[in-house]
Image: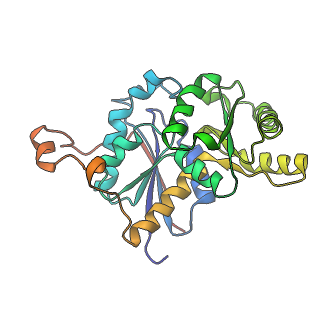
Amino acid sequence: MNARTKVMYLNPVGTSAYDDVFADMARKFKCPDTEVHIASLNPNSVAPEMNNLEYRAYESLIVADTVKAARQAALSGFDAMAIGCFYDPALLDAREISGDTAIVGPCQASITAALNVANNFSIIIGRTKWEDQMKQTVHEYGYGQKLASFEAVGLRVEEFHKNLKETRKQLELAAVRAVEESKAESIILGCTLEVGFYAELQEFLRARFSANVPVIDCSIAALKAAESAAWQKRIGWTNSRVWGMEPPPEDELERFEIFRRDYEFGNLIKVPAD
């Protein structure tokens, strides 16, 4: 790759508490010529103490800022933006306004990755609460028949990295259930804060079943999907702008006084190209 790829990884909450976690992931897994900006939303417009989107009510509060972030990413010359939540919040809304900047979500990216290497997948989630909305999303993407099961581990978003030993144990139990009882051929970690556990879990499953069971880390999958979309852009595969993907007219945005100011992110961490 001769030209630098510029990707934004959006942490779609008003706290920067998880930004370093995602920055570490980007440093480890990005392509050498990719520059990644980890950004969180503006705490002046999104509740700064709201550290999860486990509830639909919480998610509704970040939609406007996520759309504004996508618009800003386009104006700032980003090739792609990943929305760092497995609910894929505001994904279609953000795509509509993002110009030539590709917008990707961890759920859609993870399913694509899983089905490249398996016939089906199970999704490990924190709480049973999440299942209804995530199942709806999987079906909307057209992959309902490929979903083997959801497996809940009884953890909230902020708890995944509090007791790493216990988290590993619960992920192992859930993954074994998925493979043995639901005949899952691959595992998707269904929360971006499950980042960092996939490699050990994959090795555990290989030892347990004497065969490979791929484990897809949704944070990494979103980053790699963003990089892939940037590659597609170079050969002319950019966002459709007809019919359902038609964007709002610029003169109308001006008349409605929408997007007149640059969006100010709450925090930015730049992970430079190598």
For the point 48% across and 39% down, the residue is 140
Residue 168 placed where, x, y %? Answer: 78, 37
Answer yes or no: is residue 121 visible: yes
106 relative position to 183: left or right: left
Q: Where residue 178 sits: x, y (%)?
A: 77, 37
Q: Position of residue 52 (x, y in %)?
A: 52, 28
Residue 107 relative to residue 241: left or right: right
* Residue 97 in view: no
Q: Quadrant of the C terminus?
A: bottom right
Quadrant assignment, res 44: top left
Extreme residue in the bottom direction: 2
Identified at 48% across, 57% down, the residue is 226
Residue 149, compared with residue 128, is above or below; it is below
User: Could you tell me which residue is drawn at 60 percent across and 22 percent down?
Assistant: 129
In this view, the residue in front, 133 or 61, is 133
Residue located 37% across and 58% down the image: 78
Image side of residue 238 versus residue 271, left or right: left
